[in-house]
Image (tube, helix red, strand yellow):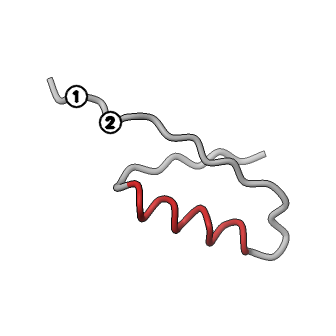
Amino acid sequence: MEIIIFDGDGESIKKLDENLISLKGVKYVKLNTTPPAEKL
């Protein structure tokens, strides 16, 4: 199992998710998103 954490705009992360799914040997991808933290 691998966990990868990304920070960026939603559109580019969704594209990355789609690219990961299309890789040979990748059987399972789950994208979880959270709202950005407010700056203090």
Q: Which residue is mark 2?
A: 36
* Label 2 crowd (10 A; few <14 / some 14-19 / many >=20): few
Q: Is residue 18 left or right of residue 10?
A: right
- Vertical relation: 40 (above or below) 19: above
The alpha-carbon separation of the residues under discs 1 and 2 comes to 6 Å
Q: Is residue 30 left or right of residue 35?
A: right
Disc sitting over residue 38 in the figure = 1
CB atoms at circles 1 and 2 under 8 Å apart?
yes
Q: Which quadrant is home to the N terminus?
A: top right
Q: Which quadrant is home to the C terminus?
A: top left
Q: Residue at x 81, y 76 (%)?
A: 24
- Vertical relation: 35 (above or below) 8: above
Q: Position of residue 13 (x, y in %)?
A: 47, 59
The amino acid type found where label 2 is placed reads Pro
Q: Residue at x 17, y 29 (%)?
A: 39
Tag 2, which secondary structure?
loop
